[in-house]
Image (cartoon, coloured by chain):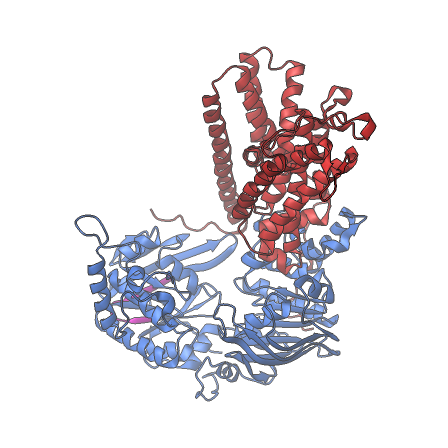
Amino acid sequence: MSDTLAPPRETRPAATPPPAGRFRKPNWNALLVEGRALIALAIIVVIFASLSPNFLDPSNLILMTRHVAMNAILAIGMLMVILNGGIDLSVGSTVGVTGVIAGYLLQGWDMPLTQLVAYPPVWVVIAASVLIGALVGWVNGVLVSKLNVAPFIATLGMLYVARGIALLITNGETFTKLQGEEGLGNTGFITALASAPLGIPMPVWFMVAFAVVFSLLLNRTAFGRWLYATGGNERAAELSGVPVKRVQTIVYVLSGLCAATVGLLLTADLPAATPRAGEFYELNAIAAVVIGGAALSGGRGTIRGTLIGAFVIGFLVDGLVLVGVSVFWQQVIKGAVIILAVAVDQLQQSLQKRRALRRVAAATNRPGAPRPA
Amino acid sequence: MTQVAERPANAEPDADVVLRAVDITKTYGVTRALKGVNFDVRRGKVTVLFGENGAGKSTLMKILSGVEQPTGGVLELDGEPVVLASTNDAVARGIAIIHQELNLCPNLSVRDNIFIGRELRTRRGDVDYAREARITRELMERLEEPIHPSTLVADLRLGQQQIVEIARALAADARILIMDEPTSALSAAEVEVLFKIIDDLTADGVAIVYISHHLEEAIEVADHAVVFRDGELVADRSAEGLTLPWVVAAMVGREAEYDFTGAAREFGEVALRIEDVRVVDPDAGGRLAVDGVSIDVHAGEIVAVYGLMGAGRTELMEALSGREPIASGRAVLGSTDLAGHSIQERIALGIGLVPEDRQRDGLVQLMTVGQNLSLASLLGAVRRGFVSRKHERGGIDDQIRDVRVKTAGPEALITSLSGGNQQKVVIGKMLLTRPKVLLLDEPTRGIDVGAKGEIFSLLFREAERGLAVLYVTSEIGEALTASHRVVVMSKGRVVREFDPRTCTREEVMAAAGEAGGDVHPKEPDSE
């Protein structure tokens, strides 16, 4: 090879050594964004603690965290979809339909074409509900990835379809007989999902478990990286051999799985399977994700941030109730907090981008002549 | 080649000068796209801008039309310094640009497109469609293209759509009309019409700034010629006595700083066999973008595909990579027919594409240098279900060293790199998949000369290890100095092949249709 170029061999890039320890070097950008959500959370806690002496009461904290947990699990699923650049409006309805299916099976399943009533054991009930949740998500995913239906539309349609099915199954009624009977071998649903081991309610345990599992999924597996890549630049990901369609389908399935989990937890918690369960839950989940610093355009967002977002929403709502703010004002304040969080986020993003550009220009160029006014 | 060093100072004020660029500079991040450019646009004259890709023409056009702001320097309109804050601002001052990709709404009528954003109002405040239609009809008559004002733009031929763009500029009373590659989509007859329109417009005192890669056409239409090279204006002269060899010499200037014509020529087996491949143009249904192309690329060989915009080169690359289907013919990698294989399967088989548009198709901007590098080969680093940091990091570090990416480290954001280093990351990403054949579409677009040389030395180094390379280029100098073989494409076909050691620049350009079919290869006027 002719070596007319004489590549400068000494300019071997000074690659910084990998950060010590098992944890990734903190991404300051993300920390700042989440830090802001943490500050919001701190402000909320301080305000409500000063307004109501009961706010920091351990029993109240546990109660609020239980509420947070339901939304946080939904939000973790929602984060998967939003990282992909999509949105899942159907999760609230999925909560309803999976809860109803669990309730229906526990009541006893009138097997078609026979006079028999089946009483499946609890693990079958749970598995069936989870499968239904995954199925709803899979349909969403196929609609979006294979048929190119816009995520907003596909999941909006599914919001109605799933809710309608929940109402059809119960005929609008609520199932309340969830304890099961010893003789039928289907007891234990409520103890399994609504107990409080070590004084911590089951939903909180689930939230922690989901957070750990999904963090690993996002940060340690190829799928996680692919998800960030498809959300960040789908075309580049595709040309790099990332199975973008499969990733897109899977995120909706994961969201459906999370919604089914919440459906089961909520049903056991009440304890009742009502077809209207989970209405508008999708909105709180989306709010938690965006307050946690995720970009609706995809590619940016973390589990940590989403959890903090869920706490902000949950503590805010419960705190307002606790200090007796009117229901109407609760709505106004919640909406304002969501908008404020995202607006500040956007502002910060553009500031950072501008600062980064300036830094790059300053580091590598003679500064150009100042632009005439 | 000729050293062109004419640079007449804009000493005395010229009454005919309507727009003057004074010491304009523009930097993008680390790239200096314009390095202090001075030039004039004169009333009633056609000023043609010559220059290779990346020479700075488009950047200057964006500045003149208000799309971008200069980093330094002043624009003077009628002798007064102006700041063109936006395209609307520029249009309001009588400067209009007609982009290569037309900016029309196909779902609206000709009339609506002409008045879009500047709708005429009646006294009641609603849109005065009657007056708009009348003015549209007058404009169309002036342009000798009798299109009815309520015709949908989607129903027009490309040439007619371009005329609608011109009409829109005229309706806004443009005094300065910038045309970026206006003939690239036109038939010969339509080009004639366009030139007649240009004559009429200049007779009316409109100043025209004209950019084209079709050098002969540009020379024909020019009153004044300005040549750019590497962000600098290197020649500024009247079009009198302007010849093709002079323009080519001025554009290319000194030879590229790299020359690989002496590189080893030890080729192996055929790595990629392209047999009579046809590809349908995804944008224009039915038309063939690639019309029966056959090329063999051997292991260790670097083949440059040279041609004009629209010759079907990008479409060929996209079909080979698996993004677009091959309509007929075969592409065989080693002994595997690529038909029916997805992009990821093809990457696994050993063929991958480095796309033309780095930002749009090559990089995930939100990710780090390391994450971008390992994206295509991530599965190789998976151990027991999880990505092994050690294995991923090893590949990344090797690649950063091998392709010589200048970065603060793998954790740096990809957007913190210069264009050339970003491109090295995109190439490194594909090299990490251990390809047998690497496809590259305009691998040096928009990066500086030094980085170009580094990218080619990288490719030649890989070729010595047996990699087969097929790359598309629009830069003749590149095709001739950095390849083992030059394949010229025109209108979807391979028209000729050249050995870069023996052919001349003019022969290759003529084959591509750049210099018109009837130009005989001439020796450049010196050396």
Q: Residue B208 at what x, y percent from top left?
A: 30, 68
- When asked about the image quadrant of residue A130, the answer is top right
The residue positioned farthest toward the top in the image shown:
A53
In depth, the one of A365 and B350 nearer the eye is B350
- Relative to residue B142, is residue B369 depicted above or below? above
Decide whether the magenta segment is chiefly helix, strand or loop.
Answer: strand
Q: Residue B265 at what x, y percent from top left?
A: 71, 79
The residue positioned farthest toward the left in the image shown:
B123
Q: Residue B201 at what x, y percent from top left?
A: 25, 71
B392 horizontally vs B361: left or right = right
Chain shaded red: A
- When asked about the image quadrant of residue A184, the answer is top right
- Relative to residue A45, is residue B515 depicted above or below? below
Chain shaded blue: B
Q: Residue at the location (74% across, 42% down)?
A: A114
Q: Residue at the location (60% across, 60% down)?
A: B423
Tell me which segment is drawn in magenta.
B38-47
- Relative to residue A197, is residue A160 depicted above or below? below
Q: Residue B90 at what x, y percent from top left?
A: 31, 56
| Residue B408 is inside the magenta segment | no
**Image quarter of the N terminus of chain A:** bottom right
B32 horizontally vs B23: left or right = right
